[in-house]
Image (tube, rainbow, N blue to C red):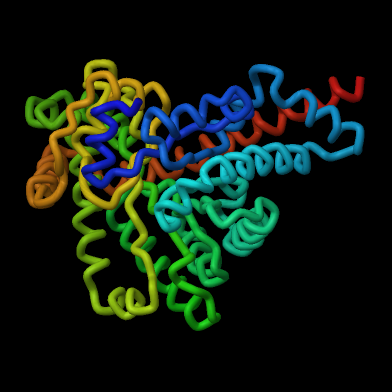
């Protein structure tokens, strides 16, 4: 039976995606159960998720042994394992994909994060992953770094659905939306059916509060302290206002006539890091039509148990949100620096997880070879 809080969230226009995937979830039927009982209509993955999945349990042992016997390299094994999980999840979500006309039922798989500074390598890897997984409901994840922006356009132009990840500022988000529209314009010129190309823009939430709150504590002034915990939600609301503006423009409308679907904002990093905050705040406070909220299972359970879904909590909040940022600047917070630090750390964290993943798999291959 579906949960009333999660039903209310879905009915308010928020697509609930799970921010986790593992062989164990797939084999045990846990993911299928979340689809049936918790309104989950998609899955996102990242290098940290796969590093965690592979480091525990025995679900991957058999496949690792087979790959070891074939003499597969660490890199080839990682690709085989991750694409197998993602392909299986894509198949599990095929009914959702069909019933939502391709809007949901999506599974995201990230390009190697070590390529975040290399446009051409990112394009090549994204197209290769699309081909390898070979499922229409895949979304290839590309980071919104300066070098990632042209890659987003090029990959969309090839008819590939893209999840743009690691977006922290509204300014960078505008570049992402521009890259998306340019990608669809090129896809149209390349003869692709625009109605089949989907995209989401993953706007990171909790990390913004974590970084700004840390700086507020350092400043220690009453003016700064009064702004604690306000930045992340304000930032996301400004992003949504930018989304409304861009996807009401003439350039976009010309593509709608050819079947194009808007690139939805996706609230990522919605697990609460600070225990003094409500554990459902990055869900309750960001309810609005036509967005995705990708949650770790702990957050999903918290929303199901005691979420407070009261309808749209975003529209019309941009002016107030801007005031928060104006006040933060006045209090001495260097907002531009915050976003630079967050993006750099975001890429580094995923790189570190990727290295851990490679290390784990190397160990497992060696063990399998005896």
Which residue corresponds to the image point at 19% horizontal and 56% vertical from the top-left? 241
Task: Tell which residue pokes out farthest to the front in this image.
Answer: 1
**Which of the 4 image quarters holds residue 260?**
bottom left
Quadrant containing the C terminus is: top right
User: Is 303 on the left or on the right of 121, as rendered?
Assistant: left
- Whole-percent x, y for residue 338 in the image: 31, 42
Which residue corresponds to the image point at 63% horizontal and 61% vertical from the top-left? 127
Quadrant containing the N terminus is: top left
User: Which of the pair 74/162 is nearer the observer?
Assistant: 162
Which residue corresponds to the image point at 25% horizontal and 67% vertical from the top-left? 246
User: Is 280 on the left or on the right of 59, as rendered?
Assistant: left
- Whole-percent x, y for residue 265 in the image: 32, 51
Which residue corresponds to the image point at 31% horizontal and 38% vertical from the top-left? 205
User: Is 369 on the left or on the right of 180, as rendered?
Assistant: right
Q: Is residue 358 above or below residue 276?
A: below
User: Which of the pair 186/223 is nearer the observer?
Assistant: 186
User: Is 311 on the left or on the right of 70, as rendered?
Assistant: left
User: Which of the pair 38/106 is nearer the observer?
Assistant: 38
- Whole-percent x, y for residue 257 in the image: 33, 79
């Amino acid at each position: 039976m579906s949960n009333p809080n999660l039903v209310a969230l879905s009915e308010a226009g928020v697509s609930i995606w799970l921010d986790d995937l593992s062989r164990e979830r797939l084999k045990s039927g846990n993911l299928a159960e979340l689809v049936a009982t918790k309104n989950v209509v998609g899955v996102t993955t990242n290098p940290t998720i796969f590093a965690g999945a592979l480091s525990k349990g025995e679900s991957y042992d058999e496949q690792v042994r087979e790959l070891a016997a074939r003499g597969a390299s660490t890199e080839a094994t990682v690709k085989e394992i991750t694409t197998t999980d993602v392909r299986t999840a894509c198949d599990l979500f095929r009914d959702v994909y069909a019933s939502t006309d391709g809007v949901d039922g999506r599974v995201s798989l990230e390009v190697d994060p070590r390529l975040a500074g290399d446009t051409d390598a990112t394009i090549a890897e994204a197209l290769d992953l699309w081909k390898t997984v070979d499922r229409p409901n895949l979304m290839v994840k590309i980071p919104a770094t300066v070098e990632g922006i042209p890659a987003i356009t090029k990959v969309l132009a090839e008819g590939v659905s893209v999840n743009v990840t690691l977006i922290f500022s509204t300014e960078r988000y505008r570049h992402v939306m521009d890259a998306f529209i340019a990608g669809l314009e090129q896809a149209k010129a390349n003869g692709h059916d625009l109605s089949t190309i989907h995209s989401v823009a993953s706007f990171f939430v909790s990390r913004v509060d974590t970084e700004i709150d840390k700086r507020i504590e350092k400043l220690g002034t009453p003016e700064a302290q009064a702004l604690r915990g306000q930045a992340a939600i304000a930032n996301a609301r400004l992003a949504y206002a930018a989304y409304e503006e861009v996807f009401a423009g003439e350039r976009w409308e010309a593509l709608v006539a050819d079947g194009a679907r808007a690139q939805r904002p996706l609230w990522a990093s919605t697990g609460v890091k600070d225990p003094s905050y409500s554990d459902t705040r990055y869900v309750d406070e960001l309810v609005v039509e036509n967005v995705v909220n990708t949650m770790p299972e702990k957050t999903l359970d918290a929303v199901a148990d005691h979420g407070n879904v009261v309808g749209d909590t975003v529209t019309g909040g941009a002016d107030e949100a801007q005031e928060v940022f104006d006040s933060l600047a006045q209090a001495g917070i260097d907002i531009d620096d915050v976003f630079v630090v967050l993006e750099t750390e975001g890429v580094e964290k995923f790189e570190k997880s990727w290295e851990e993943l490679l290390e784990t798999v190397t160990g497992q291959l060696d063990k399998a070879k005896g």
